[in-house]
Amino acid sequence: MKKQAFKYLCETCGKTYAIEKNLMLCSHCRDENLEGKSLRGVLKVKLPDSLSSSVRIHASIDVFDYLPIERKYFPLLSVGNTPLVKAINIERDLGFKNIFLKFDGANPTGSLKDRASYLVSAFAKKHRIGKIVVASTGNAASSMAGVAASAGQQAIIFMPSTAPKAKLVQCLQYGATVIPIHGDYDAAFDLSLKFSKRTGYLNRNTGYNPLTIEGKKTVSFEILAQMRGKGVDYVFLPVGDGVVLSGVIKGFLDLQFIGAIKQIPKIIGVQAEGSSFFHSAFYQNKFDLSYKADTIADSISVNVARNGYTAVTDLKKVNGDVVLVDDKSILDAQKYISRMSGIFCEPSSAASFAGFLKMKDRIPRSKRIVFLLTGHGLKDVDNAMKALAFPEVCEPDIEKVMKSFGPAH
C-alpha cells in the first residue's frame, strides 16, 4: 500500500489534506486562539478508499498496513501486543461470563500512550525531525521520552510540577529535557504549543497532533485479533482529554470500513466526578472553559478536554455512553482488580472498571466485555497507598509471628 494514499480528514468540514510535517489542525475549522480551549479542526487519518471491504471477517490483519507511516521508520522498541487477560476470578465473583482486561501497562514505558508516541516517532524519523515536544501529566511524557530515546531522538517535556514522581523519574532516566511548570496540564499544554511554534520542533500533544489518535487506534485492532473471532460487546475505558476514546472508536470504525467487523462495540467512557468536563459536554453540550478538575486519577485529570468536540461527536456517532465515578470507587476498583486478577493498574485505568461496577446491573451477564487498563500501577503508588492498610512491623521472633499469623489466627 502506497502511504501517499493516506490523507488527513477534518470530519467537521470534510476537507482533506496531504499528510505533512507541519500540519496539525484543519486550517478552515481551527480557532485563531487555541489557548485554554477544546480544539476545533482536529484531523484524523483517512484510510484509502481502496481498503474499503478489502478483508473478510476474522482474517489475519497486519496493523502496519493501516497506518500512514512505513514500517521501516518505526523504532525497534516493541510497542503493543499487550495482554488481553480473561479475568476468571472476577467473572465468578460478579456472575459474568466474559470479562477481559486489556493491560496496556505492559507497554515499554508502562502506558497506552506508547502507541501514539511510537507513530509520532516514526513520523519524525521519516521527516528527519530530531526533537519532539509534548505536554503531559506524566504518561505521555514518559512515553515520548522512552520511545524517543529508542529512536535516537530528543524529547522536550512540559509537565506540571505536581505530576507523580515516578513519571518524572522515567522522563529523566530516558534523558529527556524536562520543564516542570507551576500550573496544571492545561497551562503546560498551551506553553508547549508556544514553544513548538517558536522552535519549529514537532509537537506530539494529544489531540493536537493527528497521529496521537491514529496511534491509539491500534489497541482496537489488537483486541479484535486477541478475541479470536468472538467479537466484543462492550469496551470500557477512562476518559480525560478524549483522545484514547477517539482512538479506540476510530480503530473499530476502521475495522468496520475494511470489512473485518460488522458492528461497533458499545463504547463506555468513564470519568472521575472531579474531572467531568467531557461528561458535561456529552450530556449538556456544555464546554465550560473555566472548569477546574480535582481528582486522584491524574492521568484523566484535565480542566478542558482538548479533544472534547471531536470525542463527543465520535461517541455519539457510535451510540456510546459516558459515566461518572468518585475517587473512592476508583481506588476500590484498583485494589479489587489487583487482588482478583494480579494486574496492578494505575487509578485512572481502574476508573474504567469502577464505571462498570456502577452500571453492571444493566448489562446482560453473557456479554463480552473488555476493560482498557491504560497504565501500570507503579506509575502512581502514592494514590494507590490511600486505599491500603500497611501492616505493623514484626519482631524477628517466630513465636510472635505464629501467634499473629499462624494457622489458628
Image: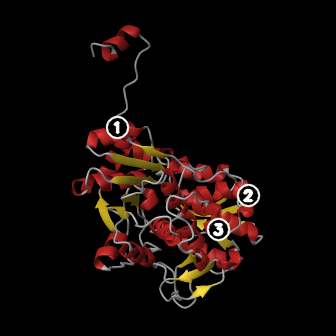
Compared with 126, 164 (above or below) is above
What's the residue at 66%, 83% (across, down)? 18
Residue named by callout 1: 89
> Which dot, 3 or 2, sits closer to the camera?
2
Name the outermost residue toward the bottom.
Answer: 28
Left or right relative to 384: residue 9:
right
Q: Amino acid at mark 2?
A: Ala
Q: Which mark is residue 133?
A: 3
Earlier residue among tags 2 and 1: 1
CA separation in Å, label 2 and label 1: 40 Å
Please identify the residue farthest to the top as the structure is shown.
399
Q: Relative to 395, is 219 on the left or the right? A: right
Closest to the observer: 190 or 78? 78
Q: Of discs 1 and 3, which sits in the foreground? A: 1
Q: Determine whether 85 is above or below 14 in the image.
A: above
* Residue placed furthest toward the right: 128
The image shows residue 141 at horizontal and vertical percentages of: 59, 59
Which residue matches tag 2? 151
| Label whose residue precedes the other's in the sequence (1 or 3) | 1
Q: Position of residue 159 (x, y in %)?
A: 56, 62
Instruction: Quarter of the image for the C terminus: give it.
Output: top left
Mark 1 and 3 residues: CB-CB less than 8 Å, in contact? no
Of residue 298 and residue 107, the one placed in the foreground of this image is 107
Residue 93 pos. (x, y %): 28, 39
The amino acid sitting under disc 1 is Asn
Graded by Cα atoms within 10 Å as few (under 14), some (14 to 19) or many (20 or more), the crowding at tag 2 reads some
Q: Contact (CB < 8 A) between labels 3 and 2?
A: no
Is the Cβ of the residue at disc 2 closer than 8 Å to that at disc 1? no
Q: Residues within 10 Å of mark 1 (few under 14, many from 20)?
A: some
Cα separation, mark 1 vs mark 3, equals 42 Å
The nearer-to-camera label among 2 and 1 is 1
Left or right side of 307 for 357: left
